[in-house]
Image (spheres, coloured by chain):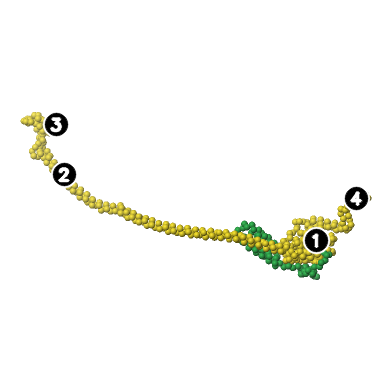
Amino acid sequence: MATVKFEQAMARLEAIVGELERGDLPLDESLKIFEEGIRLSKSCLKVLEDAEKKVEVLVQEKNGKKKLQAFSPADEVDDSSS
Amino acid sequence: MIVRGRLTVYEPRGEYQIVLEHAEPKGIGALQLAFEQLKERLAAEGLFDQERKKSLPAFPQTVGLVTSITGAAIHDILTVLQKRWPILHIIIAPVQVQGEGAAKQIADAVTSLNSMKEIDVIIVGRGGGSWEDLWTFNEEPVVRAIAASRIPVVSAIGHEVDVTLADLAADLRAPTPSAAAEMVVPVLSHLVTQLEDCTVRIQRVVGQRCAVERHRLQAHVSELSRMRFDVQEKSQRVDELTGRLCQALDELSSTMKQHLRDCHHDLLSHSPLYFVKHGLTLIPQLVTRLHRQMKSVTLHRRQRVQQVVAELNNLSPLAILGRGYSILYNLGTGQIIRRAQDVRIGDELKARLASGRLGCVVKDVIPPTSA
């Protein structure tokens, strides 16, 4: 998800809802932004559905390079010292 | 323990009392001094300026987490993040949060996460602890790394009362690690509801609008068909009137043509040419008749004149003279003498004869015997 694009899409969608609810647009313009709104709403939902849920840990290897590896809750140790 | 306060005496019993205004563990004063000095220096550089604070993305995709891999903080943060925004990609940069080398690790972790372009926001956190435990977050490299981060940083260090320099440098300070997680991500279910609500609202609004427009359209359509009927009716009337008009014009036209033909005929029959032609034949006849008449009249007149001349000749005194008569004139008066008594003896008279004249003298006058 391009964060900025998603935010813009949400903002645009809300603007469209506002414009349509004000009801002062010509019909063809209303239908045009209605379609845009439905498209945005679908694509936003799709973005949310498609987003990959994962937790990774950035680990430093012996050669000093860093790499990501999957994090398992088992790594999480309840340690009150932190 | 170092304390500061007012010393008072309770007179009835002669006891001393100290009213404390300030107390600190022995040894903390040095740390506090270092804290204040560093804070002042970094503030002077503008590291804590409000204008530097970046706003957080509303819908982060990837969050970097700088904290200890063990402990309550990471557990709380992960729990809240995953509960609210289950689609989040989380990259944990595990660090020591206290002790030797912790500051460098934290600073390095913030810098490393900044080199990963997919990260939208960073949480730097640790659970509660003593002021000394939290000291790492007052160390200059940590503060500078946070201030230099191009990615927005949310700090969640210790409890709400503990304010570290890292907190001051961060773009947003959360009171606890859980609160940091709440600040960083929205609630997915709310967002989905909001999206669905948007969809429902625009569908409802557009549906209503379409219904209204359809109704208007139908009204226009029936109005149009009524008008079309009107137009058809009127056009039939126009056709009918046009036919009648054409017919009337034809009739008028043929009447006028007939009248015109009559006029033309009349005009031709009264043409001056006709009279001219007629005159041209009549004039020679008249001329002939005139000549003839003139000749006849002339002849008649001439005969009459000759007759009168003959009669005149007969009556002429000269003609009488031819038969032996003569005319006497008084030579003096020139009068013709008709009676004897008009002359006396001796008067000279002139006598006119048929041929020539005579001079005479009167010798005797003899008047008529009986008058």
Chain whose colour in the figure is yellow: B
Q: Is B360 positioned to the left or the right of A1 in the image?
A: left
Cα separation, mark 2 vs mark 4, equals 204 Å
Task: Determine if residue B185 is in view.
Answer: yes
Cα separation, mark 4 vs mark 1, equals 40 Å
Q: Position of residue B141 (x, y in %)?
A: 81, 61
Q: Which mark is residue B305?
A: 2
Task: Report whether mark 4 lies on the same chain as mark 1.
Answer: yes
Q: Which mark is residue B8?
A: 4
Residue at 47% of width from left, 58% of height from top?
B234
Cα separation, mark 1 vs mark 2, equals 181 Å
Q: Nearer the viewer, mark 4 or mark 3?
A: 4
Q: Residues within 10 Å of mark 3 (few under 14, many from 20)?
A: few
- Residue B113's image quarter? bottom right
The residue that label 3 is drawn on is B333
Mark 3 element type: loop
Quadrant where the N terminus of chain B sits is bottom right
Task: Check the residue under mark 3 and report the chain it is in.
Answer: B
> Which amino acid does the dot numbered 2 rest on?
Val
Q: Earlier in the sequence, mark 4 or mark 3?
A: 4
Q: Height in image: B364 above or below A6?
A: above
Q: Residues within 10 Å of mark 2 (few under 14, many from 20)?
A: few
The residue that label 1 is drawn on is B157
Mark 4 element type: strand
Q: Position of residue A38 (x, y in %)?
A: 65, 63
Q: Earlier in the sequence, mark 3 or mark 2?
A: 2
> Which amino acid does the dot numbered 1 rest on?
Ile
Cα separation, mark 1 vs mark 3, equals 199 Å
Q: Nearer the viewer, mark 4 or mark 1?
A: 4
